[in-house]
Amino acid sequence: MESNAVIVIPALNPPSSFAAYVEALKKEGFSRIVVVNDGSRTDKLPVFMKLKRLGAVVIDHEQNQGQGAAMRTGFRYYLDNYQGQSDGVITLNADRQISASDVAKIASSLHNEQAMGSFALVVGTRNLEGKNVSDYDYNMGGVMKLLYHMLMGVRLNDPLSGVFGIPDLRVRQCMDIESDGYAYVTSLTMSFEKIGFLQVPIGYAVYENGAEPTFRKIPDTVRILFTIFKKFILYSITSVGASILDVIMFGIFTSVTFKGNPLAIIYGTICARVISASANYILTKRFVFHFKSDSAQTTTKSAGAFFLLTAMQCICSALVVSAVKFLLGGSAIGIKVLVDTALFFVSYKIQHKYIFKDDKKKEDPADGEKVKEAANSSVMLVDAEPEQEL
């Protein structure tokens, strides 16, 4: 069956089997295949010549620019030539070639999502429990699955597969992702966390004979993990900065502004907390969660919820510390550190999931309502087991 999805494949020194793989995709009904030659050696030119004879579009990078840059080049070609005429983009790998029938499953799911008015990211999910699975994929897959769940509340069985079905409306969003190299795949996945995912089981593919893997386990793994933790690290920095500002302002108010006033501590505490919380809200909104809503109503709502959460945090901290101190004794400072640390993580989850949940990218005005519906829709998890709701 003919598919109108466009396949994008970054390729760096691909194995000789790559041409046969593209031919198999053609036979499966994929007539639109874009291959990005990301600075391959000249001895690999015959492979790309075969691809051109097969009807694939080959775009050359004179020098190697990395996985992320190659994918963006493919997306740019899609936007210039196919946008609005296709279900979207399917991303594949030249070195680890999933079967053409599995690619057809991704295309079918992508088409069905569009037909239902949903714009979730279709993720090809490999079975990482099989005997052919490498130790790295097994261990790193488990770590990433846990981190996605803990930090973002997202249940992805295989966050590192790199096999995606990106809806037509969302391809432009992928051009705005700043990460490069293999971390780009992680950033792309994270950019859909508030829109949704549809997981489709696919076979596990080992490296092809003659493949020259460019993935560097230590540096690329560090970059991937930093991408995952970046938002939480920024959140920690803004929170610590707000706490320092709170102490400084408290000192100014109690020793200068309200000096000699019997209620100086109370006034100083309130005024300092209002200033530090305001600064924390602005920094968190802009630099952590990139909350870009232009609606005054939405901004007011998020600010109100943020200050309410801050107030509840203070009250909860005071009550729990007092209760634990009364029941168990010990150092109030030590108890407060433990309690506030726990509240710190709880606050992050609440802000991420509820307060700054309406983080919208720039979209075509005509598609605004569809995107809003898609963002709020319930996306089903497709797996070998019975369906579960994310």
Image (cartoon, grey):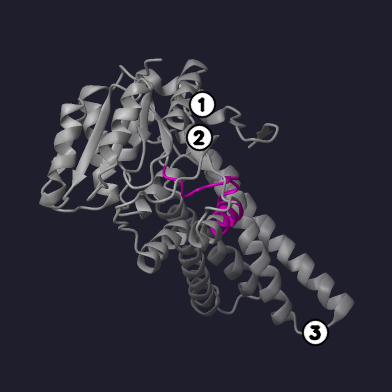
Indicate the position of residue 192 as horizontal and vertical percent values.
46, 39
Depicted 66 relative to depicted 339: above or below: above
Q: Quadrant of residue 167?
A: top left
Between residues 158 and 26, which one lies in front from this camera angle? 26
Which residue is label 2 attached to? 195
- Residues in magenta? 142-162
Q: Which residue is mark 1?
A: 374
Amino acid at pointer 3: Gly
Q: Quadrant of residue 361?
A: top left
Quadrant assignment for the C terminus = top right
Residue in view at x 30 percent, y 42 percent: 176
Residue 202 x/y as whole percent:
51, 37
Q: Earlier in the sequence, mark 1 or mark 2?
A: 2
* Numbered circle sitting on residue 168: none
Is residue 4 inside the magenta stretch? no
Q: CA distance from mark 3 to mark 2?
A: 46 Å
Residue 88 at x, y percent in the picture? 36, 26
Q: Is residue 304 visible?
A: no
Q: Is residue 120 left or right of residue 364?
A: right
